[in-house]
Amino acid sequence: MLKNKIKLMDKYIIKEVSYPFILGVFIVTVILIGNYFFQLTDLIIVKKVPVPLVLQLLAYKIPSVMVETFPIAVLFATMTGIGRLNRENEITAIRMGGVSIFRLIIPLLVVGITVSGLTLILNEKIVPWANHQANNIIRETILKDAMPDPEEEVFFKGPQGRLFYVEEYDEKAGELRRVVIYELGQDQFPEVITAERGIIEENRWLLNSGIIHQYDEQGRVIFESKFQEMEIQLTDEMKELYGSQKSSSEMSREELGKRIALFKKSGINVDSLMVDYHLKLAEPLTALLFVLISVPLSLSGKESRTLNLIFTIVIVFLYYVILSFSRSFGKNYILPPLVAAWLPNLIFLLLGVALLFWRDSWQKIINKIFKILGISTAVFLLVLSLNTAGSAEEFRVNADYLDYDQSSGFIKIRGNIDGNYGQYYLKSEDIKIELADGSQRSLESAENIELLPGAISGCDFDSPHYYFDAERVVIKPEEYIKMYNIVFKELNGRLPLLYWPYLYISLKEENSNFVPPFGYHQQRGWFIKTKYFYNNRFDLPGNFYLDHYTISGSAGGIKQYFLNSSRQEAYLYYYTQQNKTDLPGLFNWEAELYHEADLGSWEEELSYFYQDYDDRIEIETGLDFYYNKQSRRSRINFDYEEEDYFEQNSRDQKDYGLDFYFYDRFFDSLTARVNYDRDYIRDPDDGLEREINRDLDLRYNPGGGWRSRLNYYDGERESPTDPLKSRQGGEFSISKRSGYYDFTFLLEQYSPRLTEDDQVNFSRLPELSLDYNPPGAFSYLGQLGRYYEDASGVEGYRIRGEAEYSDSFSLPLNSYLRVSQEFSSSAYQIEGREYDRIPNQQHSETGLRLRTNLGRSLTLRNNYTYREQWGYTPFEFDEVERKNELENELNYQISPYLDFDLEGGYDFLDYQYLPLEAYLDLNPTENWELKLGTRYDLNNMLFDDQLIFSSTYESERWEHRLGLEYDLNSSRLEEIDNQLIYELEGDWGWYLESNLSIDYDYDQQIREANIQLNKRFHCRELKFSYDYLREEFTVQYSIDLFPADPVGFTKTEDDLIFESRIEDRLKSGDL
């Protein structure tokens, strides 16, 4: 009886997928044939090809289209048919009858194997012949009046029984690459001609750099001859025999294999053909693989038909993307041909098997539990695949009884219930589970889980230590947990601590202070801070704050979300506090309006923050729009900050600005960029300062070595202390690169930024440049232009030539020398001035870089730069600064323990030494690093900078970082930064963190000082913290089920010594 039912099930499933399969074949075939038809309309219009001939061509294309259609149709049929059975709970009924997913998939595998076999037969017997007939129609139609040209990777027969093969063909240049000609001699023994290159001329091919092989009847080489050039005569018979031309798609697997074997004997690389050879077997199996993928996906949820169609499109797209990449890698010799052909099938096979085992794993667990209990105890295991937030939690329950009402979509579990939902351990006598969409959903998805009554904990109930004992618990997966009339109990329930009539816990929030932290503030007294989560009747979350300080008074507020989804979030926040003792710097109330949206291509963020004090108000607001789609990007940003004092207007401050940015690419060759910045700063001492900058940049690169650019910018800056400054400039250039030459035509008005006072405005109207960079060590530059300089008022012409040499040499005694020499000469003609001699300037710069390895660990580097200038220039922008310096560096390194650098040098122009810099990096152990650095002025015999020292130690439990700055001239400590962290992981672990930063330059100002001590007590944690600058300590109790907000410390805005590189601090002077 059971066998008959199973056979009936197989027929039913095959019938269920047959109709979608036929529909899928029809739809996809019509789409692909229609696509071919639109591509061939040019034949009817331009070539005047008769319509019946085009229809004949389409008919020949149908077999190859069918081969492409079958796998897609199988995927569509499986997703549609099995998806319908799953949505209507027929799969659930079959599974409850004891049928596993592996037995369920057998009829579908039969369908997949049948379709794969049919595809293989078509691919071998019909498709090659049909493709050959179709391509012959195209060849004879398009090329009927011209000598046929060869195609890439195509075999074709020529006169006298010759067989031709061309791997690459450049039609524009008429050039062939990697040519093979196979010819049978009079004795029927083959002769094979191979050539690297060839040129097509009328009725002949000219082959270059080739070799001739002749073989005997046993396939052994009996003659071999190389040639530099060979002429192959081709007559008009080629036109008649052009129909014998074949690509790999026009050959069966057996025929292609014979050609490959032939070429292997001639030593020709056949990897590209081998990829096609293996694909002829791999591609037909796609239908079977799509069955393995689609069955578990169609059972994973009760999605709509539209979503099943989307799944189909995504899977097909991913498969053919992977196939195209692997095929390309195989043809370009990156992957072996066998791997390239079978890689997509292997990936999808592993993915399909993994999905099947994942899908069936919970069924095996149920069977094991039934074997253990063996009697009336019903144990139920549910794996909830929750789709609301893109991730899933598992719901596991053990119970005495289970009832499922399919009509109402409810599951009722009763009697001695215990289990867990993710990290939440549950205990109850009655659980009711509401399935999403009622009966339209299966047992694998729940909308609500309700416990009446219930206990919930973050610890296993074998040793819970704490739990929430509630009259009612409602869990909305991935959204929230609601509890009613709750008592929080510690010490395994022996110690009731807290009571709430109602408690809401958001599962989206990372932290939740369900137990209020308390502590002491030096000026505000003892305090307790309460943060309460809730959910309103519109299913929108919110926070309620209630704090109390024994000296300064009470405080409280609310934060209510009015938009809360994966794409948008918006809330309104308000907080007020008493100030009974008139403490300075304590605000009366604050409020914030915030909105954030991510709409795919568009992103938006809006914030408005307001604080009210006794003597002032502070406002911070910002608006940011960002658009990013394909090549187009744009951003609009507005920010505003204000401090407004009620009675002291001289202390008012404002800072606001608007930024706009736009970028886009057109036609893959034209890019456009627009920048607009407008900033205002009102300072109580300096008054209002404003700055505006605009920038437009267009670049066009059409190819062929051509480049062009159009750039325009302007700006202005004004403040009470500085007069109005403005800038306006831009450039237009056209460049052409040809071989070793690069020519540029430039029109430019250069205007530096308003903050760069050391630069001058000048224009080039125009400037012609020619760069010549031949192979070797030399390069050359020639320039001719007309220039005008604003600062000096000089206008005239300049002609300039430059030659540069750069090369490296190996010397004896482990030395290496790099030599560079640059020489330039300029001549000027200035308008309105007469000279006895033409103004001119010459410039020479010599660079010598010598590196000597004095031993395995010791290296000496000497860099010498000599820059000299003769004559003079009427302009300022091209003035040459003389230089004559020798720089030395001695490096001693024993990797990875020691790295010592000593740097110095001498300035021969000023006759003084360069600063002597010393850096030491020492690693006494693998976990401990010491760094030391300083600078010494040899001219004044004083230290130029402080001694900077840092120590970093990191181990499994300890972290210690120390930074010191010490003034060696005055023997005085300037700054100290220290951080100590100790962590012992585990259920009973410890965590200790201490931070201290003191700057002695400002009367021993403490920039940062705090300490935190955490003690874990199995599933919960007790925190003690002290902040010196806030003058408060805090005690906080939290459980791992609902972690508390992290302790916030006052942090210094300056970089700590151990957070920055010593070299950067010394050279920047940021001490």
Image: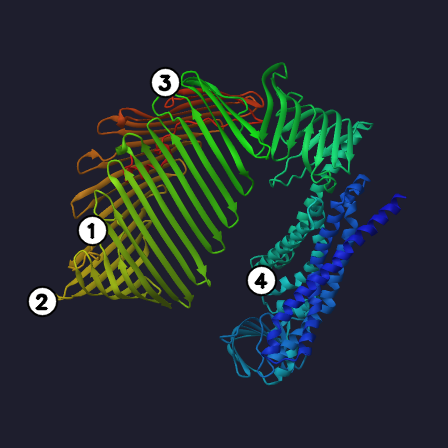
Mark closer to the observer (3, 2) = 3
| Residue 579 place in picture, x, y as percent | 39, 21
Q: Amino acid at mark 4?
A: Lys
Q: Residues within 10 Å of mark 2 (few under 14, many from 20)?
A: few
The disc, 4 or 2, on the residue closer to the chain's N-terminal end is: 4
Give the number of the disc on residue 883.
1
Q: Which residue is mark 3?
A: 581
Judged from this view, the residue extending furthest toward the top is 494
Tag 3's secondary structure?
Answer: loop
The residue tagged 4 is: 331
Depicted 367 relative to depicted 101: above or below = above
User: Image height check: is 205 above or below 120?
Assistant: below
Q: Are marks 4 and 1 in contact (CB under 8 Å)?
A: no
Cα separation, mark 1 vs mark 2, equals: 30 Å
The numbered disc on residue 836 is 2
Label 3 amino acid?
Thr
Q: Which circle, 3 or 4, is nearer the viewer?
A: 3
- The secondary structure type at the circle numbered 4 is helix
Residues 650 and 966: in front is: 650
Which of discs 1 and 3 lies nearer the camera? The answer is 3
Q: Is residue 213 visible?
A: no
Q: What amino acid is labelled 2 in the image?
A: Asp
Q: Earlier in the sequence, mark 3 or mark 2?
A: 3
Direction right: furthest residue: 1
Q: What is the C-alpha distance between the residues marked 3 and 4?
A: 81 Å
The mark closer to the camera, 4 or 2, is 2
